[in-house]
Amino acid sequence: MNPQQQLEQVVVTAEQMRQIEARIFAAGMPVAALMEKAAGLTASRIRQLYPLSQVSRVGILIGPGHNGGDALVIARELHLAGYQVSLYRPFAKLKDLTAQHAEYAENLGIPSHKDLQSLQNCELIIDGLFGFGLERSLSGEIAEAIDRLNEWSQPVVSIDIPSGLHTDTGEVLGTAVRATYTLCLGLWKRGFFQDAALEYIGKAERIDFGVPPQEAWAILSQSEPIRQINLSSAKQYLPVPRPPVTHKYKQGHLLVICGSRRYAGGAILTGLGARASGVGMLSIAVPESLKPLLVTHLSDALIIDCPETETGAIAQLPPIASDFSKYQVIACGPGLTQQAQSIVQAVLKAECPLVLDADGLNNLAQLGTMASLSLRKAPTVLTPHLGEFKRLFPDIDRPDRDRIQAVQKAAAQSGAIILLKGARTAIAHPQGSVWLVPTSTPALARGGSGDVLTGLIGGLLAQSATSDGLLEALVATAAWWHAQAGILAAQERTELGVDAFTLSQYLLPFLSNAIDKT
Ligand SMILES: NC(=O)C1=CN([C@@H]2O[C@H](COP(=O)(O)OP(=O)(O)OC[C@H]3O[C@@H](n4cnc5c(N)ncnc54)[C@H](O)[C@@H]3O)[C@@H](O)[C@H]2O)[C@@H](O)CC1
Ligand SMILES: Nc1ncnc2c1ncn2[C@@H]1O[C@H](COP(=O)(O)OP(=O)(O)O)[C@@H](O)[C@H]1O
Ligand SMILES: [K+]
């Protein structure tokens, strides 16, 4: 991957972007020239998205800082290109560079208004009120204007970030613009990957104005990386092509422990996720009454029948499943019920990597043995959704507020790799590095899709888990693959057509498409 491709993947805080910008200026780039470049590229993209042949009246919202400066450069370019531009300029006091652009816009004859209402007839709105410099909550006249704008129906393009969103946490500070498109300037900001921000951001694109890699890395290398997982990085971690000479046990042996009489489907779905990973050997331990069902659905797997409790949960692991030395990885949890505490206690002693999900996590929370995770000889991967996360880490305040920070804290606290599920899944290593899954689909918000993920993670780890650093990337690769399969399935079957079984059947078609194309 070349240095520019690496920058495409990184995700920065407002403070890091500020520091990188400061280095660029200190190296001699004039501030006005950088604004001209960033805003010029943004204007070109807006002209592509909304050509003059389709849109002529454009309303532009001008803030007091450099986001407003960008907006004024865009206003000038669109005006010169023949668009009818009107400005909403609620602030009397502007930063110097912004004030200069405002004066020029005025001299060009671009009308400017103190009330938003004057822009109501515009066919397109551009939001340049605030970018990464927003510090305080919005209130008063500006907040009212944004609320009114959100009731209008024309498309809105936000520059850098929708005004009102916190650049790092994606939180709404008072109120925020609901954009159709957000054109993120320079490097991807954290807020774009926070669930809370997604309904405001609309479609997100990055405007690459040429951040010099050496200036970026001088700042970014001071902390653990936060990166997006994409096809080119995932390809490094997928176990294809296979070595020409191999055998099933060399392709990994995964033990899945899951299911109960009550939750039989979860066991099948976990097995199907594992099967799609291509793992060499798949053993699935289930309560004995489930064995015939599992054999029917997963004829390729070795189904281990376990003695069960009266309620139909696994009571104990038979010798074949409790000799953990035979397996490269154990994935445990989907459908176990809360009756399987002793099973979770037992697998914690395994000396191979362990993936815990669903009731694996609930039992772990009940046992109160989080501290023991850091004593394990091999890595642990926990894959909670937000509810499970809160049960596991009750002292991490409001994890929904900054999911990236929350997952970092949880990993540091527990010594485990934590995958926090959601619209934008985040995976953190105890040392602080984070992978983010940049795209997904709400079609996956459906019972059982997490079970498929657990099997897929287990299967990928079993095939390639060697070192700790690699493990976290493999977990991210599985989450990315799972999301991409969901996107493909939703494209072909609508967002309503992606039940968990269907999802499992799209994992391999997605992969063969993706590999073919590259
Ligand atoms: N990424 C980059 O390196 C570049 C950034 N540029 C632009 O510069 C922007 C950042 O500019 P600034 O640092 O000037 O910040 P902003 O333009 O985001 O906003 C800061 C201004 O808003 C005021 N303000 C903050 N919170 C407020 C509130 N709640 N109510 C009222 N006023 C409030 C501040 O006093 C300041 O005047 C970026 O978002 C981007 O649009 C581009 O011009 C050039 C390249
Ligand atoms: N709105 C959403 N957008 C994208 N992905 C989602 C969304 N909601 C849930 N998902 C994904 O769906 C899966 C749900 O898993 P989980 O909550 O464990 O469900 P279950 O236990 O029923 O299988 C996770 O991979 C999660 O990231
Ligand atoms: K903005």
Image (cartoon, rainbow, N blue to C red):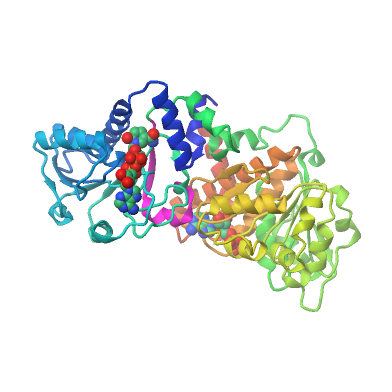
Q: Which residue is the extreme one toward the bottom?
A: 310
| Residue 46 rendering spot, x and y as whole percentages | 26, 38
Q: Which residue is the extreme one toward the top?
A: 28
Looking at the picture, tell me which residue is in the foreground, 280 or 469.
Answer: 469
- Judge from the rendering whether residue 244 lies leftward or rightward of residue 111; answer left or right: right
Query: What residue is rendered at 72% in x and 66% in y?
Result: 259
Does the image show residue 179? Answer: no
| Residue 293 rendering spot, x and y as whole percentages | 73, 65
Query: What residue is rendered at 76% in x and 43% in y?
Result: 280
- In this rendering, the count of numbered labels is 0
Ligand 1 is found in which quarter of the picture? top left
Q: Image height check: is 296 above or below 29? A: below
- Judge from the rendering whether residue 69 lies leftward or rightward of residue 80; answer left or right: right
Query: What residue is rendered at 46% in x and 48% in y?
Result: 168
- Judge from the rendering whether residue 266 lies leftward or rightward of residue 197; answer left or right: right
Looking at the picture, tell me which residue is in the foreground, 143 or 242.
Answer: 143
Query: What residue is rendered at 12% in x and 37% in y?
Result: 106
- Judge from the rendering whether residue 314 lies leftward or rightward of residue 179; answer left or right: right
Q: Which residues are magenta?
A: 192-208
Whether 201 is among the magenta residues is: yes
Residue 421, quarter of picture: bottom right
Whether 191 is among the magenta residues is: no
| Residue 419 rendering spot, x and y as whole percentages | 62, 52
Does the image show residue 246? Answer: yes
Residue 304, quarter of picture: bottom right
